Image: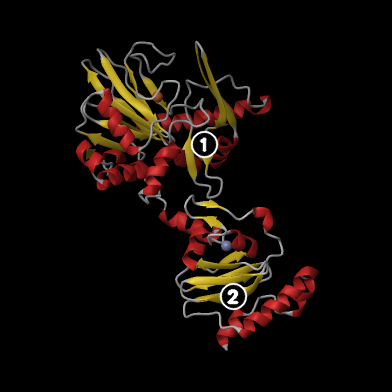
Amino acid sequence: MLLVRNLLPVYLNKQSIFSMPCNLKKLVTHNIKTYLNRNCSTKTIKVKLNMYDAEIKNLFWPSALRCSYMWLRDHCRCLKCYNVSTNQRKLDLLSIVSEIHPINCTVDDESLKISWSDGHFSSYNVDWLWNNNYQGHFHHVRQSTKTPVLWDGVEAGKIDVAHVTMETFMNSDVGLCSIVDSILKFGVAFVTNVCPTLKATETVAVRLAEIQCTLFGNMWEFSDEMVHSDTAYSKQALDAHTDGTYLTEPPGQQVFHCLHHDGTGGQTLLVDGFRAATELKSCHPEVYDRLCKTYLEAQYIEDGKHYAATYTVLRCHPVSGSLEQVRFNLYDRAPMYTVPEGEVQQTYSDLQDLARVIRHPGGEWWFKLEPGTVVFIDNWRVLHGRASYTGTRRMAGCYLSRDNFLSTARQLQLV
Ligand SMILES: [Fe+2]
Ligand SMILES: [Zn+2]
């Protein structure tokens, strides 16, 4: 009897019935009748039908799950509603009426079965419902997503950044997982024992993800010959920055391989942009907020090319709110015509605040890239730079798009 009472819709009181829309009064009465006539519960799962949604309780879930009828009908995964070969929806969204509601419902330990007012029958795996509903998905995301492990110059020497030999990386899922996991956690990973050639670098790169072609082509090799209008093609020192701020989608991964260097200097500099932004947020939350909202343009101009993109320096996930991208390149800033005059002074101050955190020597990780070691750098998180150098230095590398990298990570079930 207790179970039946638990299943009664929450609107089973006079006041709420009177306040509900006229076209739903009939539905409510009908549902009550249906439920009193059926035993729709198990030991672990209980379902309560509300006016617009089903409330599902599972002893193994941290909270009850509420799925609106519209959502449930839209997420039917039967062969009429969903193409399992292409993983695409078949059910026409416009065919679902807003008054859609269950006529009948049964539930067991694994599935929820609903006969709908439009005559359709749906069967849902309850765990699937949890994992794919807002409430469950974001609980799951918060629990399972690799939380970035932030590092500064001192911690960089202690964190467990992956160093995997090319043989292991190329020939085992364990090697690939180790590199992907390291990038997700630290934004950096190394593959060692690589032949110092462009071809071997490409072989390593495409094992992780497809190459992102940019104005620099697919694979590139550069020295101090100024073949592009970029300071990278010189012997000068470079402050920490991210690449491609002038692109709508900046490269996801930066791939570097030093093929040859016969001089001094040229050490690689890395700075954890997420750590810098997090530090800024804890000291000056208002500056962090403004850098998430203020749009700045970046540009790349050379003969025959003119790229420009207008984005914020910091960008957070639109739903979870967690920091997702740092776009920071002081060299490639376009004229600041995206900021109204009254906000210019504040914007400069904010940018300088972030630059000071990024340039703080305590946050810098310096190391010398040697021929034979390929480094993957998450260009949406970790800033790179270099010391000036002498002699001949040839670097090879490429970009991998974030989409392609995350596709690899999802297939490995690491995100
Ligand atoms: Fe760069
Ligand atoms: Zn269906």
Res 191 quadrant in image: top left
x, y (%) of residue 198? Answer: 28, 23
The 10 Å Cα crowd at callout 2, few under 14, some 14 to 19, many 20 or more, is: many
Q: What percent of the width, then of the height, locates residue 269?
A: 33, 28
- Please say if the residues under marks 1 and 2 sit with CB atoms less than 8 Å apart: no
Secondary structure at numbered mark 2: strand
Q: Quadrant of residue 102?
A: bottom right
Residue closest to the eye, 103 or 345: 103
Residue at horizontal 33 percent and vertical 13 percent from the top: 224
Q: Which is more N-terminal, label 2 or label 1?
A: 2
- Three-letter amino acid code at disc 2? Cys
User: Image point 27% across, 16% down: which residue?
Assistant: 393
User: Residue at the location (53% across, 80% down)?
Assistant: 41
- Classify the position of the N terminus by image quarter: bottom right
> Which residue in the structure is indicated by mark 1?
314
Q: Secondary structure at mark 1?
A: strand
Q: Is residue 322 left or right of residue 166?
A: right
- Tell me if I can see residue 148 in this picture: no
Q: Tell me the amino acid under the disc marked 1.
A: Leu
Provide residue 228's location: percent of width, then percent of height.
42, 14
